Amino acid sequence: MSNTMPDTASNTTFNTTTHALTTRTTTATSAIATIEPTSTEPTTIMPTTTEPTTTEPTTTAPTTTEPTITIPVTSKTPKKLETVVEIIRELRNEIDVMMDLYDSEDEDPNH
């Protein structure tokens, strides 16, 4: 019968004859461990994955050239139609001005 009682959990050994307590200490020789395969089968190393970084796409308003509507006004055009054409032109101009203001607010970082 052995006169030592090992305690593997705390890395100590108690000698029952001398009543000496021996502590085993281990020091690491390197921070990187070398793992050697225990079998002859090929070892598969799974690649580490990183979360893809996503960037928000920057959107800019598409610049489209709207078709120009040309309605010729002649002396044969009825007066009411002429008035409607003029109102449409004024509204288009107002819309263009409003769009320019809206676009300029998007470009201004203070808004």
Image: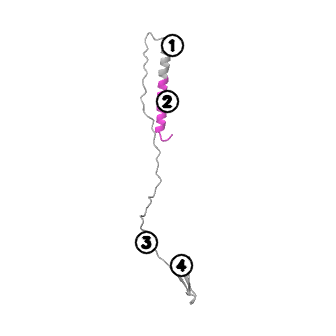
Q: Residue 60 placed where, x, y %?
A: 45, 38
In this view, the mark in front (4 or 1): 4
Q: Mark 1 points at which residue?
A: 80
Q: Which residue is drawn at the image coordinates 48% and 11% (left, top)?
A: 78
Instruction: Count residues near mark 2 (Cα–Cα under 10 Å), then give few for <14, some for 14-19, many for 20+.
Output: few
Marks 3 and 1 sit apart, C-alpha to C-alpha, by: 94 Å
Quarter of the picture holding the N terminus: bottom right
Q: Which residue is drawn at the image coordinates 49% and 21% (left, top)?
A: 88
Q: Which amino acid does label 4 sit on?
A: Asn
Q: Which mark is residue 108?
A: none
Q: Earlier along the polypeptide chain: callout 3 or callout 4? A: 4
What is the magenta segment's predominant secondary structure?
helix
Q: Earlier along the polypeptide chain: callout 3 or callout 1? A: 3
Marks 3 and 4 sit apart, C-alpha to C-alpha, by: 20 Å
Q: Residue 85 placed where, x, y %?
A: 48, 18
In this view, the mark in front (3 or 4): 4
Q: Which amino acid does label 3 sit on?
A: Ser
Q: Is residue 11 above or below residue 99?
A: below
Q: Mark 4 points at which residue?
A: 11
Marks 4 and 1 sit apart, C-alpha to C-alpha, by: 105 Å
Q: Earlier along the polypeptide chain: callout 4 or callout 2? A: 4
Q: Is residue 93 above or below residue 27?
A: above
For the record, the magenta segment spans: 91-111
